[in-house]
Amino acid sequence: MLDVSDLTVAYGQAVALDQVSLTVPERSITAVLGANGAGKTTLVRTISGLVRGRGGSVRLDGLDISRLAPERVARLGIAHVPEGHGVVTELSVEENLRLGSMASRGGGVRQALEESYELFPRLRSRRRLSAASLSGGERQMLAIARGLAAHPRLLLLDEPSLGLAGQVLQQIMSKLRSLVADRGLTVLLIEQNARSALSVADDAVVLALGQVVAHDRAAKLAADRDLLGTYLGF
Amino acid sequence: MHTLLVLIIEGLVQGAIYAALALALVLIWRATKVINFAQGAMAMVTTYVALFVIQLGLSYWAAFAIALAFGFLLGAVVERVLVRPVESASPFNVVILTLGLYLFLEAVVPMIFGGSIRSFPPAFAITGIEVGKVQVPLSGFDLFTFGSVLVVVLLLAALFQRTNLGLRMRASAFSPEVARLLGIRVGRMLTTGWALAAVLGALAGILIAPTLLLQPTYMDEVFIFGFTGAIVGGLDSPWGSVVGGLLMGLVLTFVGYVSPDLETLAGLAILTAILMVRPQGLFSGHRERRV
Ligand SMILES: Nc1ncnc2c1ncn2[C@@H]1O[C@H](COP(=O)(O)OP(=O)(O)O)[C@@H](O)[C@H]1O
Ligand SMILES: [Mg+2]
């Protein structure tokens, strides 16, 4: 579904991604792992159009999206939940969710809100509150719910585990799995926390210093002790 | 007692005009994070357009509608054509640009419309309404001035609070990057913000013109007072700016009653005092601000 090939991204002279190639198959969860500074965030920001690549391409079902503005990419059905959640703190919880549902290509606002509250009942009771009053974990839930409210085809999650309790994270991951099965969702899951990501993902990519050092089935990488030890600090 | 009532009414009516201008500045501040120093001059242009329409023989109401519509267009064009290209570099560039636009408009308007002082008709009589046998110190035009600002402010509040467009505009102002990730065309939202701000300015310009008389610089003072109202309100708070504008109207009317010569000076004194003592304004939650 998503094909990244030979993608090179640099901030000034500093190369953050060096000829990165990877594929994300439809109806699957692909994890992108790597230490801090490996280039994971740069990868998703380039896919969603916030950062321009210097070379290479990003294709969604064959369509080159690497020159599109982020709002165009979003309208093609790619939802990006940014690192550090990116909820709009000046707006209420429900307004954040409404914004997500506006990007949806199908289904009404009401339905999207209902789905969000079903997924995270805590958000229902806080729906009129300012998003600024939420805890870090609740903000992360809100950001993920907002991403899903767009009914995206491809969901880009940048470190969702940040600030979330293990139990809530488990719950979100199993929800993602069921959306993949039932709704044909495809997920690119960025994680520093390799253990939880590898347990939920179908495939995994390991980035180190802007380069792909491994790209295989998640189960296979999870068993590769050398690799985990070298790049992921196990 | 009677004098006090007269002053309060006059202050609130003047204040409504400052509130409209203050709110215009706040809308632009929230969208682009700059002060639009050309806000008053743009309102001056739309009022000249209104006068032109009246002189063509059309009614006041046609001129009123055209001025507001022209304001919408002017605001949109200024954002799209002038502000957008320089915006990415630094907010200072936009500030300099609006100052340049202010000078340009005040220079070019006399070339087109002539520089002499012109009178501008009010929508209604400016003499006090009679209730029974008593003449109250409130004219039909006062009511229209206060009422039309109130209506426009309430309409804007409804737009921002109750509609999807308003929600998109707020999201774009607060968090442009997140808004773009949600598929919102942030550029369009900013253009709309500038356009709506210029409509408010046009409203202020046409409402104050009968009192001040029309000339290329006639909005300069109104701009300062509206700006001060916006600063009093905290610059990022729409309701704060409305309250700030009304306060300015009241204070300046009282000062003007004591000595008309002191009015402008008092406006500047309040602006300076607020900037020195409480730069975040009286109603803002934020403590810091750029430019
Ligand atoms: N906006 C930026 N400007 C300059 N360098 C950046 C910027 N964002 C990231 N980098 C650099 O690019 C590299 C990759 O960063 P990032 O993509 O955030 O990695 P990760 O998400 O894996 O921690 C790092 O060396 C980082 O310092
Ligand atoms: Mg990162």
Image (cartoon, rainbow, N blue to C red):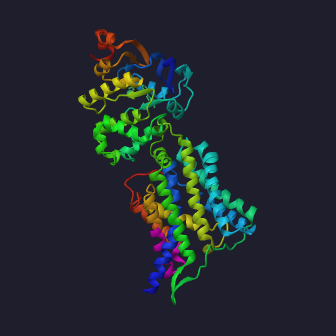
Q: Position of residue B121 (x, y in %)?
A: 66, 74
Whole-percent x, y for residue A120 in the image: 30, 36
Residue at 51% x, 78% y is: B256
Q: Residue at x 74, y 64 (%)?
A: B113
Q: Find out whether residue B255 is within the magenta segment.
A: yes
Dominant SS type (magenta): helix
B73 with respect to B238 (left or right): right
Q: Quadrant of the N terminus of chain B?
A: bottom left
Seen in the picture, residue B59 relative to B38 is either above or below; the reply is below
A118 on left or right of A156:
left
Q: Nearer the viewer, residue B148 or B73?
A: B148
Q: Quadrant of residue B282?
A: bottom left
Residue B127 rendering spot, x and y as whole percentages: 58, 82
Magenta-drawn stretch contains A6: no
Asked whether the viewer can see residue A66, the reply is: yes
Q: Does residue B37 appear in this view?
A: no
Vertical side of B260 occupied by A130: above or below: above
**Residue in the foreground of this view, choosing between B206 and B25:** B206
Q: Position of residue B69 (x, y in %)?
A: 63, 57
**Where B2 falls versus B66 (above or below)?**
below
Q: How many numbered discs, if any?
A: 0
| Left or right of A171 on screen, residue A49 | right
Residue A124 higher or lower than B196, as above or below: above
Q: Quadrant of residue B281?
A: bottom left
- What's drawn in magenta, residue-wise? B246-263
Residue depicted at 49% across the width and 27% down the height: A46
Q: Quadrant of residue A111?
A: top left
Q: Quadrant of ligand 1?
A: top left
